[in-house]
Structures are given as C-alpha cells and as structure tokens.
Image (tube, grey):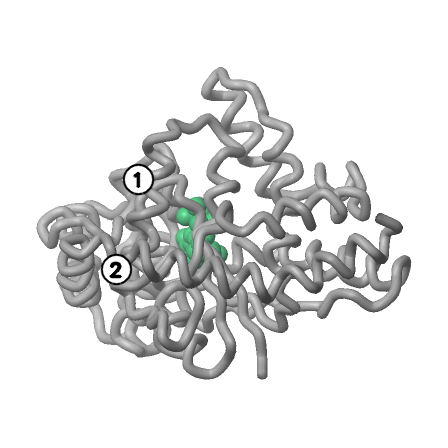
Amino acid sequence: MTRIFSGVKPTGHLTLGNYLGAVRRWAQSDQHRADALFCIVDLHALTVEHDPARVRRLSRQAATLLLAAGLDPEVCTVFVQSHVDEHTRLSYVLECTATDGEMRRMVQYKEKAALEQRRGGSVRLSLLTYPVLMAADILAYGTDEVPVGDDQAQHVELTRDLAVRFNQRYGHTFVVPKAVHPPVAARVMNLQDPGSKMGKSDDVSSGIVYLLDEPDVVRRKVLRAVTDSGREVEYDRQAKPGVANLLEILAACTGQEPGALAGRYDSYGALKKDTAEAVVELLRPLQARHAELCADPGYVDGVLRAGAERARGLARPRVDAAYRGVGL
Ligand code: ADP
C-alpha cells in the first residue's frame, strides 16, 4: 500500500494556504487511498525564535484543527514529531550524508535567515539543517508520496537526493519519495502582498486568512485584498498576481477552474465578495468541529498518544537499519 507522510509546523495559526495547499487533500483523499501519516512537526518550530508555551499551545491547536478538518484517526495516523525519537536519530545520520553547500542553496533557508537578520536576531544552526530533519521525517517511514504545497518542492527534492545517495553508499535502506502538489492553489499568496506566499508566521498578517478567523474577519481581509491596476478580471499570475490569487482561492473553494471563473466577473469588487463568502462557507464546518473537539481535550490526547505509538513502531526498524548501514 502506498505510504504517505506530510506535516505542519506549529509556528503560528494554520492558514487558508495550509488548508488549500495541503490539509484539505489529506482529509478528502490521501487518508482514504493510502497508509497516511500526518505529523505536527514541532521540532521545526524551534528553528526560529520561539516562545515555549506558544509552541506547545500551537501544536495542540494544529492537532485539533487537523482532526476538525476531517483527518480520521481510525484510518490515518496523527502524531507529534517530538513524541517519536526516531526523527532526530535519523536526522543526525542524514546530516552525515548531506553537504553544507546543498543546505545553503535552499531558498527557504536564505529567505528565513534574511528575515531573522532583518528582525535583529541571530540565525539558528537548526534553520540551516531543517531540511535534513524534514528528510528524516519522510524517509523514516518508507514514504512514497509527500502531499505538500509547492513551497516545499525543493525540500522534497533534497530528500530524494539524500535517499538516493544514502542507498548508493550504504545499501538499499530508503524508499525514494516524490512530492505531490494540488492542481489549484498550490501556492496561496498573501492578500496584502501577492508576490509572497501566505505563510503562517509572516509579518503582514492582515493578508493572511487563518482557519479560525471569524466570518467578519475573513470578509474584511478578503475585501481589502490588494488587487492590480486596470479593471479587467483576468487569470494571469504574472501581470495580475492579486486577482489571480483571488481567482485561485475561489476556484479551490468551489471546485472550478480559475481561468473559467475569470470570464464571469466584470469587477474586482464582485470577485472579492464571492471569494470572501466562499472562504467563510469553506471554514464554517471546520470551525464548528474545532469548537466541539476543544471541549474534549482527552480525545485529542488519546489520538496523539496512539499515533505516536504506531509511528514509532513503523520508523524504528528502518532507522535501526540506517544505523547499521553507516557502521554503528
Ligand atoms: P507555513 O509556511 O504556513 O509555516 P508549513 O511549513 O507548516 O507552512 O506547511 C504545511 C503545509 O502547508 C505544507 O504542505 C506546505 O507546503 C503547505 N503550505 C504552506 N503555505 C502554503 C500556501 N501559502 N499555499 C499553499 N500551500 C501552503
């Protein structure tokens, strides 16, 4: 059976980008067609300045939101990365397979390191090695497919390179995984800055729709989205990135094609209004289910405990084999 692995970082509240780019497919398709593991990758939240209590709170909130989005612990495995030691065990061995040069070429490292420096902070070493830990997350489980937004494409490519290199040097140990991106909304952009992706820890938070935003907050953010010069509603990511982003969001919410939708609008205002309502409707059931789950914290704890146990059992033999392979 196909094995799927993917994750979310508890570095901020989950966004519409996380949902449309990844989580929705995990719930609607991936968990039903494969043996799927979904992980709250909390170790990755320590790669930038963090508040311990906030990371703990956000991990829990992310787990609750994944369940609210429809992940069913009866058919898939939901767990927290730091509960399973195999991830860090394997990460070290992969650090001995990766090179300094290939880490420094990672676009996300360059962007995030620059951001940390602009904020006056220092760059943690773990920010540089983060893609190696991500490779360990994936490779520990013999993963075939990694369903992610396209911001993660380079990291999955690195994971493939490390798997191939390790297998060549030490004998076949890892499955070489591939990234799978959604056809629409693979990269939802910030509504206030359509040149950059909607990331949960960005500075321009008025351009980010969070999954737990109240309907009126969603409406305000979408109606104030930056649009482009001119008046024509056209689907052109280069010339009209703001409008294209709204069309993609609306298309992803309603199951239509962004290009076809463009022809139905003769003003930006009408497009924004429909997009806002589509997002409100998309989030409504998820928010209701989240409120129910918050009333039953013992349930979420139980899911995470069982998830970690299963994950540990799956990862250990392969990580042990990797240790033997390198001579330990
Ligand atoms: P973030 O950048 O919000 O911290 P994570 O690294 O936690 O996101 O990623 C969780 C999942 O959401 C990944 O599969 C990632 O590719 C996807 N994702 C994140 N942001 C976006 C976006 N703006 N559009 C589409 N997918 C996204």
Query: What residue appears at the point 45 percent right and 76 percent down from the top-left corner?
Result: 30
Contact between marks 2 and 1 (CB within 8 A): the answer is: no
Image quadrant in which the N terminus is located = bottom right
Residue 111 located left or right of residue 213: right
Front in this rendered view, residue 279 or 327: 327
Q: Which mark is residue 299?
A: 2
Dot 2: within a 10 Å radius of its alpha carbon, few (fewer than 14), some, or many (20 or more) residues?
A: few
**Of helix, strand and loop, which one carries label 2?**
helix
Query: What residue appears at the point 55 percent right and 55 percent down from the top-left corner?
Result: 152
Picture coordinates of residue 56 (x, y %)?
35, 38
Q: Amino acid at mark 1?
A: Arg
Query: What residue appears at the point 35 percent right and 65 percent down from the top-left corner?
Result: 248
Tell me which numbered mark, 2 or 1, is placed earlier along the sequence.
1
Seen in the picture, residue 64 relative to 3 is either above or below; the reply is above
Residue located beneath label 1 in the image: 57
Q: Amino acid at mark 2?
A: Tyr
Query: What residue appears at the point 52 percent right and 53 percent down from the top-left corner?
Result: 151
Where is residue 279, by image quadrant? bottom left
